[in-house]
Image (cartoon, rainbow, N blue to C red):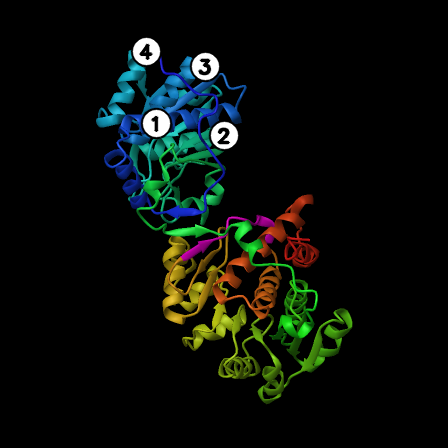
Amino acid sequence: MRTHSPSAPYSALPDALYRAEQVRQLDRYAIEALGIPGIELMNRAGAAAFDVLQHHWPAARRVVVLCGGGNNGGDGYVVAQLAHSANLAVEVYTPPGLADPSGDARIARDAWEAEGGRVATFNSEVLDAPAVVVDGLLGTGLEREVRGGYAEIIDAVNRSGYSVLALDIPSGLSADTGMPLGVSIQAAATVTFVGLKQGLCTGRAVDLVGELRFSDLAISAEAYHQLAPAAVRIGESAVNALLEPRPRSSHKGDNGHVLVVGGDAGMSGAVRMAAEAAARVGAGWVSVATRASHAAWINLNTPEVMSHSVEEAAALTPLLDRATVVAIGPGLGRSEWANALLDAVIESGKPLVVDADGLNLLASKPRRCDRWILTPHPGEAARLLDGSVAEIQSDRFKAVDALRQKYGGTVILKGAGTLVGLRDGSVSVCTQGNPGMASGGMGDVLTGVIAGLWAQGLSADRTAEAGVSIHARAADLAAAEGERGLLATDLMSHLWQLVNPHS
């Protein structure tokens, strides 16, 4: 009988993210260099998964385990054994026509059957009675669209509405892109092993993995020193370390001057929100260059911001001379006025944050610059790369790299699991934030946050990482009362709180 520790090793999520092939390399190193038998790793994975199952569903009495032919299925057989030992009613099913497993998965299946366990072919009646479903169908090696019996099982499980625990990754989800390959299991919880897959943190994955848990299977740190991660999650502690308390002698001139450019007719709110956000994260001065019809109104509603009427690009010159960082795009529009302002700002040589219509104008007249931070959402990214939103979302990591290579600088690809393409070619991922952020003005606030932090002396890359993290965490705090109806301006007081982590 297989034994189970009541504290199987699962943990908070690590910051390092890996592609599927890299995780296979880690597996091989653990087996070949560290001498851990593959079946031992499988047993550890099953124990960690069963621990999560007990934690999430302590009242579960019936468990349906779905096993494919690979090591993912082998993990499932281990879970089945442990559930049986815990006196749960356990049923194991495989897709129609599946060949017998080999290697470690075969050892795990034989052990299950040696204890009297049965393996049957899945049929629609399996899900007639309530159960917790354990998904061990398809692992991280999936590269083609799911078809046939596997697709039918996934559809049946999703239609059942029963809770699903996914082993390593929800079946059908790409470990590298976070997008379904045809169809994907909708999990309530996922426990992933050895290395946190980058695809679990962005794209559609955020809707499909449920609560994400991680176990390194007690593999020593030596294995992880053998290769660099494909991407890194933006850690709250790393961001907080950038925000040291100011010297008591600090004055506003030490903290930078942000100039926000935009606000064509009818769009004054965008520049006002960007300007207020820049001030809330600590910029010493904040100015706005906008249409004459808006200038006085902005100053009345946000008196801390200096508002200037700019009807001709030439009027920007003295404002640009005083600016530390320029943010352009919020409410800018696509008129001749907007084009002239964008050209003047680019020619100024100042560090730039480019968003919204600034990006749309850039897409129509591409150019490269190493002193800007671009902040496109998928629609803007599609225009910048002359593609479609579907193409951008199909592989967000590929898209952010293509944007960085074409346009230079630091690139933030917004969305669920925002990506930051850094200047050295690496990628950071923000795993904070919530659906309430899908509302007007959120991007304008992010633009102001980034410009305000950059003006205070951070590097472009650290600014981008800190900006998306603080913005997302502020939205999470603001959504404590509910996500639906969250407004961009609801973030302001939380921004102030988060840029003072040592207070």
Q: Decide: is 401 above or below 347.
A: above
Name the residue rendered at 46%, 30% in the picture: 164
Query: What residue is pinned by disc 2?
Result: 161
Of labels 2 and 4, the one closer to you: 4
Q: Earlier in the sequence, mark 1 or mark 2?
A: 1
Q: Give the alpha-carbon distance from disc 2 to disc 3, as whole Å.
A: 20 Å
Name the residue carrying label 3. Answer: 88
The span shown in magenta is 427-438
Q: Mark 4 = which residue?
A: 115
Q: Is residue 56 left or right of residue 256?
A: left
Occupied quadrant, residue 146: top left
Residue 189 lies in the magenta stretch: no
Question: Foreground residue, 123 or 186?
Answer: 186
Q: Of the residues shown, which amino acid type is indicated by label 4?
A: Glu
Type of the residue with mark 3: Leu
For marks 2 and 3, give the one nearer the viewer. Answer: 3
Q: Position of residue 298 (x, y in %)?
A: 72, 73
Q: Nearer the viewer, mark 3 or mark 1?
A: 1
Instruction: Report how far apart the C-alphas of labels 1 and 2 lie in the structure.
Output: 23 Å
Which of the two residues, 321 or 80, is positioned nearer the viewer here? Answer: 321
* Residue annotated with mark 1: 75
Relative to 345, say whether 441 is above or below.
Answer: above
Q: Amino acid at mark 1?
A: Asp
Cα gap from disc 2 to disc 4, whole angstroms: 30 Å
How crowded is the residue under tag 2: few (<14 C-alpha within 10 Å), some, or many (20+)? few
Secondary structure beneath label 3: loop
C-alpha distance separating marks 3 and 1:
17 Å
Tally of marks: 4
Q: Position of residue 196 (x, y in %)?
A: 40, 42
Disc 1 vs disc 4: Cβ atoms closer than 8 Å? no
Residue 434 part of the magenta-drawn span = yes
